[in-house]
Amino acid sequence: MSEGFRLGIFFTIVRPEEKAILAAAEERGVPVERYDDGEATFGLEPPPNLPGVVINRSVSHTRSVYATRCFAHYGVPTVNAPDVVELAGDKVRTSLRLAERGIPTPRTVVALSPEAARKAIDQIGFPAVLKPAIGSWGRLMAKVDDGPSADQIIEHKSALGSPIHSVFYVQEFVDKPGRDLRVFVIGDRAVAAMYRRSEDWRTNAARGASGETAPLTPELSELAVRAAEAVGGGALAVDLMESKRGLLVHEVNPTPEFRVLAATTGVDIAAGIVAYAVGIGRR
């Protein structure tokens, strides 16, 4: 380690994932500079004593985008890079990029008004899934089974008034076998995979889904790495579903939680992230 090299971590709260990253850095003898996303400020001129690299762990997409842009302005690389955070954090842009790269993904239609949203749902067919273009943990997602429920959900989203809810992101409902897959990719390698099982159609660990180690088959690894590279690469979680058409990539997460994945698989993901970040910072 170069003398004086420090690692930065930009965070909202210190969750188990952040504790694991801090512990991994300490184990490697890497000093850490902490940046609370609710307190940090960014001027136009670089402040003194900047770290060699910053790991972004903010739970806010907006704060992540602007913070990583500011660190890049100062010449400090981030994990993940600003373009990756911005692209992968937006489901519409992610779907477009996956389609451009020929990566199998659920059928998706985007609408920009309530009137067009109903057309989009009709194009997808029932059941359909409405998701916010930006968001995580399965929040504000809705499974739509018929016309009346579609109208109610569209009316509700319109009443929220937020600009993000004026974008209607509609996907086919994939009849997966009570589980989906999460694969963690660091650099050019898939390092861990698990099934997320749930009785609910949303199989997010944050919503109580249980984890089970999944085999990292050549097909799964290759597809996950391709999806990660499609959004720019880095330390990313790729979510996939098993379908009658084969594996489908439905999300790529730029600031993922990994506590359940690490505990399930026994893979020290935090150590992998720190090693990757230090490698980026020392280039």
Image (tube, rainbow, N blue to C red):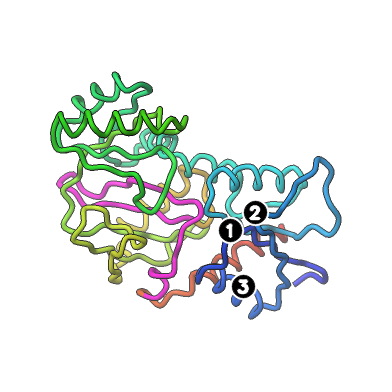
Q: CA distance from mark 3 to mark 2?
A: 19 Å
Above or below residue 25? Residue 203 is above
Crowding near the residue tagged with mark 1, few <14, some 14–19, many ≥20 C-alpha atoms within 10 Å = some
Give, as a single range, the part of the protein colored magenta.
236-263
Horizontally, residue 282 falls left or right of residue 114, namely right
Crowding near the residue tagged with mark 3, few <14, some 14–19, many ≥20 C-alpha atoms within 10 Å = many
Name the residue type under label 1: Thr
Pointer 2: what residue? 38
Q: Secondary structure at mark 1?
A: loop
**Residue 54, how many percent across, how many down?**
67, 58
Q: Which quadrant holds residue 178?
A: bottom left
Above or below residue 176? Residue 5 is below
Whether residue 115 can be seen here: yes
N-terminal-most mark, 1 or 3: 1
Cβ–Cβ under 8 Å for marks 1 and 2: yes
Q: Secondary structure at mark 3?
A: helix
Of badges 3 and 2, the one in the foreground is 2
**Residue 84, how many percent across, how many down?**
54, 44
Q: Observer-nearest residue: 24 or 111? A: 111
Check residue 73 for magenta coloring.
no
Pointer 3: what residue? 22
Name the residue type under label 2: Gly
Horizontally, residue 282 falls left or right of residue 196, namely right
N-terminal-most mark, 3 or 2: 3
Position of the C terminus, as image quadrant, is: bottom right
Q: Secondary structure at mark 2?
A: loop
N-terminal-most mark, 1 or 2: 1
Which residue lies at the image location 58% right of the left edge and 52% below the top edge? 80
**Residue 55, how many percent across, how many down?**
62, 59
